[in-house]
Each structure stands twice: as C-alpha cells, then as structure tokens.
Amino acid sequence: MNFTAFGEVLFDVFEDNKKLGGAPMNVAGHLSQMGANSAIISSVGDDEFGKEALEGIKSINVDTKYISIVDKETGVANVSLTSKGIPTYDFNKDNAFDNIPMKDYNIDDCDVFYFGSLSQRNDHNVEVLKSILDKDNKAIKFFDINIRKKYYQNDFIKYGFEKCNILKINDEEVPIVAEIIGCDEAEPTVVAKLQKEYNIEIVLVTKGKLGTTLYSGDVVLNQGINDVKVVDTVGAGDSFSAGFLNSYFNKDSLAESLKRGSLLADYVVTQSGAIPSYSDEVKKALDI
C-alpha cells in the first residue's frame, strides 16, 4: 500500500513524558509497521521538538518528504488522563501543523489518503487540503473526523463527507454530526443520511468498550473488544483505523477488516503511547 496522510504532527505531552503523535502520524506509523509505504503531509517548527519529531518519524520508516519546516512552534498536545485512562487534550495555538505550506503535493501514486479535522481548524489548511482532494486521483479517501473540543469547521466537515469513501466517527461525535447535517441524533438515522446524501461507502462508528459498528449499504456489522488491562487509550482509534485499512486494502472481508482493526486497538491500549512496537503475537494475528 502507498499511504499518505494529511495533518498534524505533534508531541503528546503527559505529566512525566512525551510521545510523538497526532492522529495522521499515528495511522501512518502503524501502517508502516504493517509494511505500507507511508508518508505524511505536515509541518514542524525549526525548534528542538521539530528536530526530534523528524528523527522520530524517520525511525518508524514514515517518509518525511512532504513535511515542511516553518517558523512556528512544533505542535504540542498537553494530555491529561482521567482515572479510567481517557485522554483530554489542550493544543498550542497557531503552531506548525496549522501552517502547512501550499505546494503541489503529488498523490497520483497514493492508494489510500487519510485526513481529519483538527488540522483544518483554519482556512489556510483547508485550502491546502482542498488543493489535494480536488485533484482527480483514484486513492481511497479515509476521513476520521477526530473532533477535539471546538477545533473544527462545519463547512469543512461537510466537504470531507463529500470527498471520502470511508468515514470514521465515534459515538460522542454522532450528535455533532447530526447537528451538522441536520437530522435526528439516533445513530442509524445519522448514518443513513450520510450514506444517502454523500454516497459514503463505509461508515465506522467506534464506541469505546462497546466496540465498533460498521455500515456499508445494507450491511451492518458489530465488533466487540477484548477484556484487556488498559494503560492508556491515546491513539487507540488511530490504531483501529490502521488495522482496518491494512486489512481492507488487502481485500479481506469487511468482517475480517473490522476484526483486525479492533485487535490492534486492543493491543495498543495495553501499551504506553500511540505507536508502540508490535509483539510477535500481534504480528501473527495481523498476518504481517
């Protein structure tokens, strides 16, 4: 798979440590571990965090050719964990990933293109992403809304619906999406309207401990999660996205793709950080 993500590169900063992250970065890192040719379109600052980020990205075999160095601070997400390990985020403002340069990013050879909403919290980045998505290419478009507080624009969310083949949202985002598209908050109602009005092929709704529901046409599949010891849930949804995409791209069934995405997420929540190295057991289960 040739995979390209667009969006934030940042450091998740915890009370006692920091980890390289950002949803697009996390997905790219996981897919690289699964054998994909991964790249990310982003930017970092000309600072120590920026240098460390570039070194970290290269160390997990994600291509940095589309990462620019700009005169802004590298992105930081100060992470607080609840007693149940659920993260909350506070991002620095007007940082490097908010200022991705307008360039001729060529994704003609891209098989899967990933984008979210956090890095589209300003008009500049929206225009940069539109310059990519409006080109005629055959890549599968994966839109992970990934809403953080009020860091999103309704018009961009609708544009993302128009451009994506696969949409991932979580259960807490369903009411937000319902308000954006103007319908009742019931999950089946929201999904039905998304599929009808925007012709989205697959909608994935993640629900924490309740697992994930997949909708594709008339097909509805539910996948539970295993009872594991949770260390933290940072990046769990991103690992699910990567596991699902890797399996789906390799022509596995929707049910098998859903299963493998959940399996990887189950593993990641037992580890510290969003992109842990895989155990031999996980590699075998993922067939990598």
Image (spheres, rainbow, N blue to C red):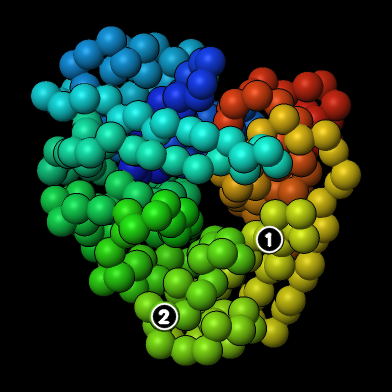
Q: Secondary structure at mark 1?
A: loop
Count every numbered label the image shows and give the total.
2
Q: What is the CA distance from the residue labelled 2 to the residue labelled 1?
A: 19 Å
Q: Is residue 87 above or below residue 32?
A: below
Specify the amino acid type for callout 1.
Lys
Q: Quadrant of residue 187?
A: bottom right
Q: Is residue 85 above or below residue 248?
A: above
Left or right relative to 83: residue 259: right
Kindly tell me whether residue 217 is visible in this rendering. Answer: yes
Residue shown at the point (41%, 80%) measured from the top left: 179
**Residue sitting nearer the eye, 245 or 262:** 262
Q: Position of residue 126 (x, y in %)?
A: 21, 56
How many residues crowd mark 1 within 10 Å: few (<14), some (14–19), many (20+)?
some
**Residue sitting nearer the eye, 87 or 243:** 87
Q: Is residue 190 above or below residue 103?
A: below
Left or right relative to 9: residue 235: right
**Residue sitting nearer the eye, 66 or 214:** 214
Specify the amino acid type for callout 2.
Glu
Left or right relative to 132: residue 243: right
Q: Position of residue 107 (x, y in %)?
A: 32, 45
Q: Position of residue 112 (x, y in %)?
A: 47, 50
Q: Secondary structure at mark 2?
A: helix
| Mark before the other along the chain sequence, 2 or 1 | 2
Residue shown at the point (34%, 44%) measured from the top left: 6
Disc 2 target residue: 179
Residue shown at the point (35%, 29%) measured from the top left: 76
Q: Position of residue 225 (x, y in %)?
A: 82, 51
Disc 1 target residue: 207
Residue shown at the point (26%, 43%) measured from the top left: 106
Kindly tell me whether residue 252 is visible in this rendering. Answer: no
